[in-house]
Image: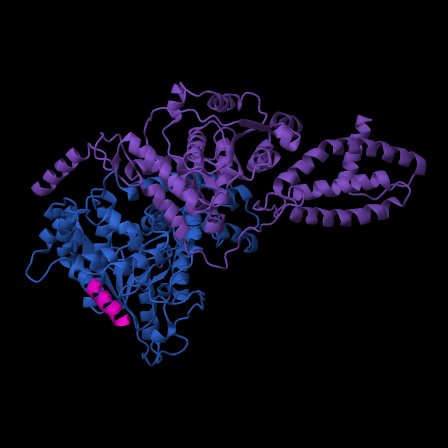
Amino acid sequence: MGDSDASSRSKRAAARLCSICNQRQAALKRPKTLQQICKECFYIVFEDEIHKVIMDNNLFRRGERVAVAASGGKDSTVLAYVMSQLNRRHNYGLDLFLLSVDEGITGYRDDSLETVKRNEIEKEGMEEKQMHWKNEALPLVANATAKISTSHLMLEPPEGYGLPLKVVSYKDLYGWTMDEIVKAIGLKNNCTFCGVFRRQALDRGAALMKADKIVTGHNADDIAETVLLNILRGDIARLNAEHFYFVSSILSADNECAGIYSPNAYRGFAREFIKDLERIRPRAILDIIRSGENFRIATSTKLPEQGTCERCGYISSQEFDLINSMIDRIANVELLIAESNLTGQAHSQETIVMENSILAVQGAESMAEKLCKACMLLEGLNRGLPKLGIGRTRGNNDLKKQREHGNSVPKITDSNLQSKQCGSLDF
Amino acid sequence: MASCGSACDQSHCRRPDDSGGAEEDVPERFSASRDSDTSKTAGGGDLARCSKCGEEPKAGTHRVLNGMCASCFRSYLYGKFKLAVSTNAMISPTDKILVAFSGGPGSRVALQFVHEMQKKSLESWDASKSQSFPVFGVGVAFVDESISSVIPSPELDRIFKHIKLIVSSLVPGHKDLHIAPIEDVCSMGSDDGTTRLNKLLNSVSDATGKEDFLDHLCMLSLQKIALDNGYTKLVIGSCSSTIARHVISATVKGQGYSLPADVQYVDARWEVPVVLPLRDCLTDELSLLCQLDGLETLQLSKRPSSSNSINNLVSSFISRLQDDNPARERTIVRTAEKLKPFGFNKFVENKYHEFIPSRLRCKFQNTNNGGSDLAEVFCTFCMSPLSESELHDMHGKSQTLVDTFTAACCQSCSFQILPKESESLQHFLSFLPQSMTRKVADSTLEQSLLR
């Protein structure tokens, strides 16, 4: 017992100096390695590790235009700084720019966009950012990632990184701002839209800005959370390493919103749990990721099908919406029936309706296979309003027809009868 | 109690539809708490019927879970146990079963159910003409971990007496009771096991590591009892709730590769295979059964668990999740079920005696694991199979004895159990139980023979 006491005392004394340079006083204990190191060495080690990840995985090619996803949070701020530093120091020859997405929710993004803008312009005096500067972040390009965990440390403000900022709005990408969508959909289901659109926003934005690659600030904590949540949800298929990093980006898009609009208890618990865990054993976060990578997934486990969306082809890894909700299909059938009502006036009403409803079901199915979720929603959104108009005009037509044909009542579906009623009421 | 509506119960919720319980109200069947059930039973006559058998409950009893009466609930739990036993060939007539009894509801129910199975086989043995088919034997093991907590010796004596009473009340069928202190596994000849064990535990600095190491030693003790007394199977009362906790804590400790080995019904990597017949039951169900049937459990003052332990943190995390959604534990276990089990997670048919008549032979599941059945290499300190990268590290270094020890160790154990400094590491290794050191020596011999 006496021995161990003495040894721990000597250890504590030795710990005061940085374990890398052995000159300066240690300022932090790195969770990843449990080393006591000083600030300067931390910068060097941290940046070198990211450089190594980039080089080992051949993340970039010279001359590429790379979008740095910037939310204004600490992860993306660190990412932008490190990327511009490394680009300069190691001469990657990359054309870097900051890419921010504006959902068009009044008062939601304003602050963070303000932060991003400030980071873009300011070259010095970034005291405020110091507060955000405590997380170790890392670039995550395509499927590659580094495993660096957070360290709770306040560092000196870094130099400004002077990257140009591009803000793309939902309006640019989809033709709708979130506020407009809420206006059209109501307060009930808008989370679906926001979540789905957000997942693709960076991809679409980057394509709009002619970027070759996107770097995001996803880090070990995010991936660890994803692993845990997937276990809690019974979603082992997604733990497959290939899909791992992709799904993590989807989830974090969800997460951002989850706290505000749709509180999901277990997600909150999981976050808290990871925080507690990190306090007890910092390396647990890296352990969770290791577990996730080493899971023995049976080959028979079904994975969500992947492919290329026919409309927005550049998102190749986007998960396809095969489990299309019945509501979507019914809506499409209705739409086509409604259209057939418009066009098919000259023909016999019944046969046209029959033919078209078969076509509509087929169409809905083929659409579900070919379009990604965002395009699907966008389709509904864009046709949602016209549908109202069609409904009304159809009502007119039907009324006219009824007047023309006298007693001939067209055999159409219940939903058509209902919308006819609405139409006639409007009329 | 509020585990109604959990995934595993729902099949039973639906059952009344086709068994004449159609007059029941839908909200009644899904009502979560027992209290609301009883209040409703007071109101309407028909509603008082058991949702499974349709019988009116006797006076003074009320429905227990999902509107089932006590006896239906019993047979529902026993059914789960029996299904697990028969589909996984856990108990065959020639076996000698050792039930690990900790005093908790899980192992108590396991003991009770094994006893009932034995009782039934004894009855049929008595009734049969030839009496040639053997009946499996049952023994009970209790590992005394009092070294790690402070239990005064009169208290300990009282506990032992209590256990003896429980075991002797299980008649017919004689059951041997083996009580062994955990330090026995560490003792070397005349050497005192207690001091050796204390020295071992003191050199493990991590709180979680200490707990896990103690768990492993407990398992070693059980294995020792089973081996010394000729038992062929070891029954552990782990239930869904404990397994769900293990799934999460193993993930957190980075044991993702070896995780599927621990969550199966059968775990034959030990010399005496371990079986988990209560794997599909929830802790709440088990303690409810103990309460209903008056099965006595022991209120053991558990190990002084540190608040810094990951196992504790995980446990409270899962409890919160379970309160939020009663199906969460089952979901976690089902997720882990999707991971590919190892070759040792099933019994191999040809191990069994052919002279048993076919109707008594165990039915083996033809689970095709697909993967190659290569012999796994196990970690010395937790018996978890080593992953490829860990094996790769292992081949690099095996010069000295210390090297072989540290090499045959999973990353998780090398972090949380092995001391960091080489001096204390040697100290630690010198006190290891013989069964562990022997295993390492054997495996190194095997390795050298293979090459």
Q: Which residues are magenta?
A: B439-451
Q: Where is the N terminus of chain A found, in terms of image quarters?
A: top left
Foreground of the two, B133 or A224? A224
Which residue is drawn at the image coordinates 55% and 37% (left, top)? Answer: A199
Q: Where is the C terminus of chain A found, in terms of image quarters?
A: top right
Q: Using the rendered view, name the quadrant where residue B205 is placed.
A: top left
In the image, taking residue B392 as reference, residue B299 lies left or right, namely: left
Is residue B314 shown above or below B226? Answer: above
Q: Colour of chain A?
A: purple
Foreground of the two, A95 or B25? A95
Residue B315 appears in the picture as rendered: no
Foreground of the two, A140 or B222? A140
Which residue is drawn at the image coordinates 7% and 41% (left, top)? Answer: A2
Residue B224, given in percent of the width and then of the height, sits at 20, 63
Is residue B173 shown above or below B59? Answer: below
Q: Main secondary structure of the magenta part?
A: helix
Residue A263 lies in the magenta-colored region:
no
Which residue is drawn at the image coordinates 40% and 18% (left, top)? Answer: A125
Q: Using the rendered view, name the quadrant where residue B79 is placed.
A: bottom left
Q: Colour of chain B?
A: blue
Residue A426, given in percent of the width and then of the height, sits at 79, 26
In the image, taking residue A229 as reference, residue A7 lies left or right, namely: left
